[in-house]
Amino acid sequence: MIEVKKEPRILAQQVSFSHRLARISGLQWLLLIIPLGYIMILMVFSMADFFKLSLFNEDGFTLEYFRHIFSTDIYLKVLWVTLKIALLVTFFSLIVAYPLAYMLVRTTSKLWKKIILASVLIPFWISLLVRTFAWSILLRKNGVINMILMEMGIIDQPLELIYNTTGVVIAMTHILLPYMVLSLYSVMEGIDQKLLLAAQSMGARPWKAFTQVFLPLSIPGVLSGSLLVFVMGIGYFITPALLGGSKTTMISMLIESNINTTLNWHLASALALVLFMATLILLFIALLLTGKNPVLKELE
Amino acid sequence: MWLRITVGLIIIVLISPILVVIPMSFSSSSFFEFPPPGYSLKWYASFFNNQEWVIGLLRSLFVALFTSILATILGIMASLTVTRLNFWGKKLFMTLMVAPMIIPVIITGVALYHSFAPLNLTNSFIGLILAHSVLAIPVVFVTVTASLKGMDRNLEWAALGLGSTPIGAFFKVTLPLIRPGVLSGALFAFIISLDEVVVTMFLAGSKTKTLPIAMWENLRIQVDPTMAAVSTILIVLTISLFVSQELVSARKARLKRKFQ
């Protein structure tokens, strides 16, 4: 007789829940659908719904609001101020960030590296309002900077450092600087440091080796960092709203006042669409210049 | 040499705003005098005696905790999608996941206000948590994707080969391996929510006024020296969160070396 071995039967209850789930095919696509749906509904759809207000009013399709923005002096002035502040902030943060990033890749001292990274990243994570408040204390008329300068006898009258372009640019440069430093650093890190040694061993002075070898190689970082800071600069709200004066109204402040004060949603939407398109175009330029998706840089 | 002096000066300028605030908070003067004429704790007393500040802080911590949980779960899902699944339009998906980081917050804020108002989600904690999570997903996504890319996938395949289900393998093998990345992503999400002003400004009402909104109103109207005390509390809170995270991951690394 051949003994027939009975197949061990597994009761349904013994199969764990996760095994039963694993049988359902295509379940892994939930990983895609849930976050995508979240962002689509809360970000993409709500933005599209809001932007619709700029092109449609009770009477149907209209370009009235855009015409209004681009033909009224006040609005054109706001656009100009926005561009000016963003450009100044980009320029100053480049000047300040370049030596920091350069030192970060060139120094052999671990301590210096740590100090530089900490001084860039700690302020970055401290509350934006706290940083803006700190600058308002430093820059005000009887503030720390004016006091020190007067005590040293450099100036007799306190300087006007706040509630004007100067104050906004100083504080925004401080706040957006980390983005510039990190963009520069990520490119500079990839530069072969031996090239500098080679240049110097062939007779180039350190300064010449820097300007002819290192600087050209770091240009991609300069470009991507500048575009990033500029993009963040044109949409900035908190710092200009708190440290700016009546002459430094930026586009984001105009959007806010149209929502909260004048309740003109259509105009606010048109202004937001202008800002959004400017952001998209600049990011597209960054994509063309560096050949990389500027938004996904950290992931590659 | 010149480089060192320049960099040293820049570092001082970068740190000084934060260092000036801390002594100010212990000042006995009602004006922002520096150095303070005398020291006292009266601004801390003024903080703890004012309901608006204390309740605002508690609300902020509450919203930040739930934002951090929600954004971390969604961020991990998005990171797994990018590293484990193949599909058309992956680049577009990744761009969408990091988009809230680069789109001006004022646009996100107004757009959410516009779509939340008819749903009665303004002036509610759920609305705030949903909105803050949008802003916090990108940073979780970036951090967790980086650690998923850095881990050894063979371990996961070994678990699957030994009969584990994909879900079991994730919770028993993958998640413990990427825990440092997940923790720092969650921490970043927490801090983003704790400090959120622009979106909150539109969505929060009298019942959901968070600490940043109270600070914002204070800065906009009449800055009172209690702000220095609030700032110092926030600075200490942020730095201690980062230091404790550093300590935890440093201890992990030490233990790991010991066992190898």
Image (cartoon, helix red, strand yellow):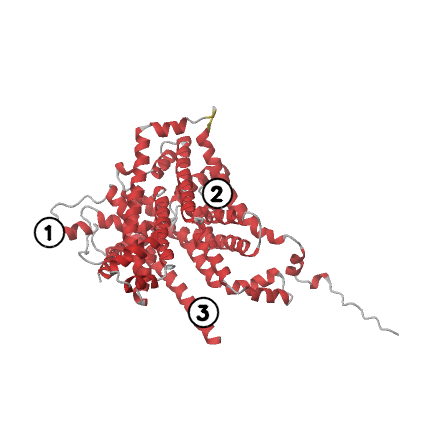
**Disc 1 element:** loop
C-alpha separation, residue under disc 3 versus residue under disc 1: 54 Å
Name the subunit of mark 1: A
Amino acid residing under circle 1: Gly
Which residue is the site of mark 1?
Answer: A153
Choose between B113 and B99: the one closer to the eye.
Answer: B99
Relative image position of residue B236 (x, y in whole percent) = 33, 59
* Image quarter in which the N terminus of chain B is found: bottom left
**Disc 3 element:** helix
Is residue B164 shown above or below B29?
Answer: below
Q: Are marks 2 and 3 in contact (CB under 8 Å)?
A: no
User: Which residue is the extreme one toward the front?
Assistant: A202
Name the subunit of mark 3: B
C-alpha separation, residue under disc 2 versus residue under disc 3: 37 Å
User: Which residue is the extreme one toward the top?
Assistant: A59
Choose between A197 and A97: the one closer to the eye.
Answer: A197
Amino acid residing under circle 2: Met
Relative image position of residue B210 (x, y in whole percent) = 39, 48
C-alpha separation, residue under disc 2 versus residue under disc 1: 54 Å
- In the rendered image, residues at marks 3 and 1 fall on the same chain: no
Which residue is the site of mark 2?
Answer: A43
Relative image position of residue B9 (x, y in whole percent) = 23, 58
Residue at 85% across, 73% down: A3
Choose between B61 and B95: the one closer to the eye.
Answer: B95
Q: Are marks 2 and 1 in contact (CB under 8 Å)?
A: no
Earlier sequence position, callout 2 versus callout 1: 2
Which residue is the site of mark 3?
Answer: B252
B43 sits left or right of A276 in the view = left
Is residue B65 in view from this perspective?
A: no
Residue at 32% across, 61% down: A104
User: Which residue is the extreme one toward the right?
Assistant: A1
Residue at 30% across, 36% down: A80
